[in-house]
Amino acid sequence: MDLHSIIERLENPQVRLEDNSAFRCDNETIGILYSNIVSTAALSYSPGLFSFRHKGLSADVMEGFKKRFQVVSRNFFYERLGQLELRKANAAFFREEYFPKRFREDCIPQSIEYKVMKLAQEGEFTQIGAKIKEGAEAYHIEMIRQRKPNYSFVAEYNEILTALS
C-alpha cells in the first residue's frame, strides 16, 4: 500500500464508532508523525544523512537509500494505522507520543530529511503534513496512470521531496 492510501485511511480510520473524530489524523498529526520518522532516521537507510558523510555516491546507491527510507516510512505509518483501527491509540496520543525531540543536523540540503527538519524546527507541522500528502498523492496519481502498483519507492521519495521544495 502506498503512502497516499495509508494517509487517507489515517484521516478516516475504520474504527466502527458513531463518532470517530478522536481517531482522525489531521495535517498536523501527519506532519508530527513524518517528522518523527525523520528525527529517528538511521544512517543505514537515510539518504540525507548517508550522503552528508559519504560524498560522491552513485545514483544507484542513492536510489537504494531512498527506497529503504520510503519502506521505513510506509511501515511506520501502516503500524500507526493499525493502532488507530484497533483503537489502541488516537490522534492526540500520536501528537504527544511521536512529537520529534531532536533532529540530526548532518544531512544534505537536497533531502527530505533536511527540509522536514527545517520546517519542524519552525513548528510548521501542519505544512509538513500538507506537503507530505501532496507529494504522496502526486506519486499515487502517477502510479495509477502507469498502471503499476508500487512502481517505484524512489519515485515516491522524489515526489515528496518536490512537494517539500
Image: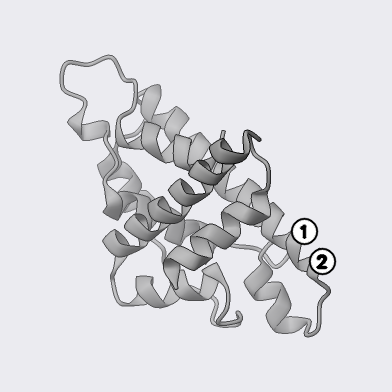
How far apart are the two marked residues, 2 and 1, measured between alpha carbons?
5 Å
Q: Quadrant of the C terminus?
A: bottom left
The quarter of the picture where residue 90 lies is: top left
**Left or right relative to 148: residue 122:** left
Mark 2 and mark 1 residues within 8 Å of each other at the beta carbon: yes
Q: Tell me which residue sits at (51%, 36%) in the image.
A: 78
Residue drawn at point x = 66 percent, y = 35 percent: 148
- Of the residues shown, which amino acid type is indicated by label 2? Val
Q: Position of residue 72 (x, y in %)?
A: 62, 49
Mark 2 element type = helix
* Residue, disc 2: 61
Q: Residues within 10 Å of mark 2 (few under 14, many from 20)?
A: few
The part of the image, by quadrant, that contains residue 25 is: top left
Q: State the residue at coordinates (37%, 30%).
A: 84
The circle drawn on residue 64 is 1
Residue 65: horizontal and vertical position, in percent?
A: 73, 61
> How many other residues sit within 10 Å of disc 1, few (<14), some (14-19) or many (≥20)?
some
Would you say residue 102 is visible in this rendering? no
- Quadrant in which residue 142 is drawn: top right
**Which residue type carries mark 1?**
Gly
Which residue is more in the foreground, 84 or 58? 58
